[in-house]
Image (cartoon, rainbow, N blue to C red):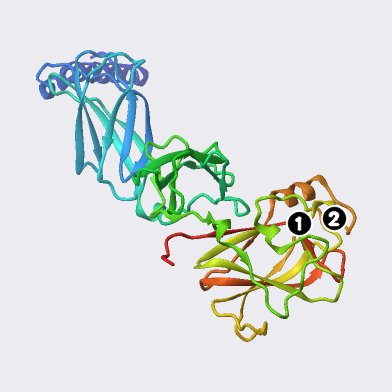
Amino acid sequence: MKKYSMKSIFYITNLLFGLFILTGCEKYADDYKDYLNDEEIVYPGLARNVRYYAGNQRAVLVWNPSPDRSIERYIIFWNNGEDSVSVAATSYDPEEDLSVSIPNLNEYAYSFQIVAVDREGRKSIGQEINNVRVYGPVYQSTLTNRPYKTANPFVRKNDGSVELNFGKADSLNFSTTIRYTNVNNQIEERELAAESNSISLPNYKTGTAIQYRSSYKPEKDAADAINVEAFEELPVELDRALIAPFRLPSDIRSEYGWELQYLWDNNTGEPGFHTPGTSMPQWFSIDLGVNVPLVSFSLWQRISGLFNYGNLKKFEVWGSNNPNPDGSWESWTKLMTCNSFKPSGQPVGQNSDADRAFAEAGEPFVFPAGTPDVRYLRFKVLDTWGNTNYLHLVELKFFRKLGVTN
């Protein structure tokens, strides 16, 4: 009997084991076909450049379609696959856009899956788009209307039109809707674009309210602009024809031909109102002509004495609806204390270009919230820029709301 060495036995054992493995692989190599019924798995082509645009309680999904012409439709799933919508494959041009708007969504961040389906019902592996923001009432509650220019929100033009002036728009502001009554007693709306600061109303009916409401896009490329919850009323200038001097025994008189009525003559140059040199404080009164809900007023100082001499620095505004004819103060209510502002902050006698521009535009003063409606105003001047014993100013312009019936 032939004997084999240990080395030969090891070699023969490994050879037999290798043949066994090879035979086993050949046996199971095609077993997967039993599960596929001898058919090949086919996945429809994928959509490309999947993206979204945020909306108001909706989302807009956009993608470039697959060139695979076997695709019949796309299915969009969300809420962990519980909700879906089907979109027909209307194009196979990868340069075109397919889109779908998914409405009635809550304010939330969603994840969507886009699956392509071919004519045989076979589905692609799908593509996900996450953190899709949907906006709604919570976001809307944070919005405020675009600010108007306090000094001159409403400007009457010589041609009968009015110009509305607004401050710089927020970066997400889309537009502001202006609603007003035209000369034919019809409600009209116009849009003020974010990049514009003023808008003209050529057919505005004098004496009627002007309302405004701004809209914002929550994201720069959002699908929807969302409105502020409500319209607000824009202040309009009080009719100057109604205003008249109201002289009381204790009021300061005029001097140098600068009369009280020049303060509402629509002229911001000289002359205005000038008083004699006596002592401080000095006060004067005016009749607005109507019991009125005041919002603000603008004051123009004497430019030839810019932030100097008798230009008003600190003063109070008082109001009354039934002033005592003896000129006493018991029938008056203090509405506000005003401090004139100098942009540069430089000492008296030194003025910058910003100081001049600010003064020439009219310095605005806003009445506090809750200010009662009044017919008569009394200006009590406590101090002037030049610390003088007299005062001067050249123009006053008052702004009111029209939503209240006199």
Report the residue at 71% width, 50% height from top: 268
Element at badge 2?
helix
Q: Which amino acid lies under the numbered mark 2 shown in the image of this protein?
A: Gly
Q: Which mark is residue 13?
A: none
> Which residue is at the front of the view, 196 or 207?
207
Instruction: Identify the residue at horizontal 13%, vertical 16% (top origin).
Output: 39
Say which quarter of the image contains residue 34. top left
**Which residue in the structure is indicated by mark 1?**
301
Q: Along the line of sight, which residue is nearer the eye, 337 or 380?
A: 380
121 left or right, relative to 320: left
Decide which of 295, 398 is in the foreground and name it: 398
Few, some or many C-alpha atoms within 10 Å of disc 2 (few <14, some 14-19, many ≥20)?
Answer: some
Distance from disc 1 to disc 2, alpha carbons, whole Å, reads: 8 Å
The residue to which callout 2 is attached is 305
Mark 1 is surrounded, within 10 Å at the Cα level, by few (under 14), some (14 to 19) or many (20 or more) other residues, namely: many
Hey, what amino acid is under mark 1? Gln
Quarter of the picture holding the N terminus: top left
Residue 245 place in picture, x, y as percent:
65, 67
Circles 1 and 2 in contact, beta carbons < 8 Å = yes
User: Element type at marker 1?
Assistant: loop
Q: Quadrant of residue 63?
A: top left
* Place of residue 114 in the rendered image (x, y in percent of width and height, measured from the top left): 27, 31
Q: Residue at x 55, y 62 (%)?
A: 295
Residue 199 rendering spot, x and y as whole percentages: 52, 40
Inspect this view and state whether residue 133 appears.
no
Which quarter of the rendering shows the C terminus?
bottom left
- Looking at the image, residue 50 lies above or below residue 27: below
Residue found at the far front of this picture: 257
Q: Nearer the viewer, residue 335 or 126?
A: 335
Visible residue check, residue 32: yes
Q: Position of residue 214 (x, y in %)?
A: 45, 47
